[in-house]
Amino acid sequence: MKNNYSHYMNCVRKVTDDVYWVGGNDRRLNLFENIFPIPRGVSYNSYIILDEKTCVVDSVDWSIARDYMENVIETLNGRNLDYLIVNHMEPDHCSAIEMMVQRYPDCVIVSTEQGFEIMRQFRYRIDEDKIIVVKEGDTLSIGKHNLFFVEAPMVHWPEVMMTYDTTNGVLFSADAFGSFGAIDGALFNDEVNFDRDWLDDARRYYCNIVGKYGPHVQDVLKKAGTIDIKYICPLHGLVWRNNFGYILDKYNRWSSYVPEDNGVIIVYSSMYGNTEHAAQVAATMLHERGVHNVRVYDVSCTHVSTLIAETFRVSHVILGAVTYNLGIYPVMHNYLQDMKVLNVQNRTFAIMENGTWACKSGDLIEEFLSDMKTIDVMGDRVTMNSALSEGNQNDLVSMIDSIVEDLKKAEQKK
Ligand code: FEO
């Protein structure tokens, strides 16, 4: 391997001495996990360490396996492959295992015990004589590089581990620190405007994929705090090589369910535009009172993964909710269910309910939220019988005043 520019025919990038990114991108996939829209595509990251022994760290999804194998073969440059480390056994990262062992039959696969169990469940054909089962604290020397294995259960499946190359400070972090979004040539965090172009996708990826497992992520962050990290190499998205405080702070907030911003999202369901109108009025009143971090979402037109990410971002959520079949409007209900499953905590909700007859949605939503941890529901509820009117506009003023006051106090505490 001469230098960074020797791979004119392949999409390989050097991460640091002896370590290469050999992954790829899928821009054709509409739905990641067949659920989440990915208009910017997604990358599947895999890495090679070239030392006395050669080592691939995780592989990729079927969709890009052909290009991927070209990257591997080119980077190995005629050498054999000695080890394939499987940090995470989800098929978006290990579909190429069989292809890899067919091409390199002497290769030894390294994973956790549960990683191998899942490998067998998915019926990958591997040579059981060529496996190494590792656990927390085990090490593997491949020459001058020493690899240290760190268990990271539920980040994002139970078998997950991370591999830390103690020689050059590279943490192969599995799904942690990943993001939706294909890599447009720029691999490193300092080659992009992360805040502008990547943060929303990184947050949406984290909250929807790993959001439920905040305490497990906190455990991993504590372990990460004890090692000297110079590179973070996740399985999706960008490689981090500086500004670690920024991304660690985001992860710390997301995994402890602490809002990033003192701000408001207004999520409404509306059949004929009247609850929508109330949502618009509420947003306008907030701005008039100096609250500018406000976004309004129609629950029927916004993918729930975006609503979840936004709920993780802000401190306050106003729900504008019509009553439907004497219950909560189904799309709103789906959003609330997802929120509960993903363990959303430490947020303040306000409710604007609507119903032409038998208005029930407010009580039902309040009951739903009462099962969730450290969720406050403001006492100032707005009840509309079909539309905002002179009869309920004072309730809206009172709700907005309470939110403004709350946000002021939160800003003062900063
Ligand atoms: Fe990207 Fe949990 O797999």
Image (cartoon, rainbow, N blue to C red):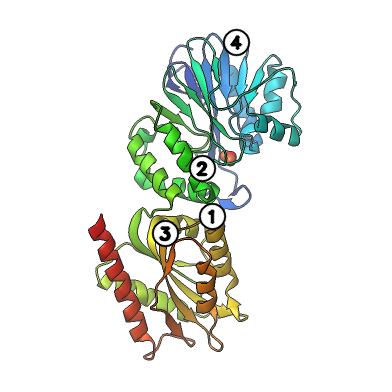
Residue at figure coordinates x 49%, y 34% from the top left: 234
Q: Check if mark 3's residue and mark 2's residue have beta carbons within 8 Å.
A: no
Residue, disc 1 = 342
Q: Residues within 10 Å of mark 2 (few under 14, many from 20)?
A: some
Regarding mark 3 in the picture, which secondary structure is present there? loop
Residue under circle 2? 216
Work out which quarter of the rendered image holds the C terminus and state it: bottom left
The residue nearer to you, when weighing 347 against 17, is: 347
From what the image shows, is residue 91 above or below residue 352? above
Residue 297, picture quadrant: bottom left
Q: Secondary structure at mark 1?
A: loop
Answer with the quarter of the image where residue 387 lies: bottom left
Q: Nearer the viewer, mark 4 or mark 3?
A: 3
- Element class at badge 4: loop
Residue type beneath disc 4:
Arg
Q: Earlier in the sequence, mark 4 or mark 3?
A: 4
Q: Residue at x 51, y 63 (%)?
A: 372
x then y, percent, for residue 56:
58, 22
* Residue type at tag 3: Asn
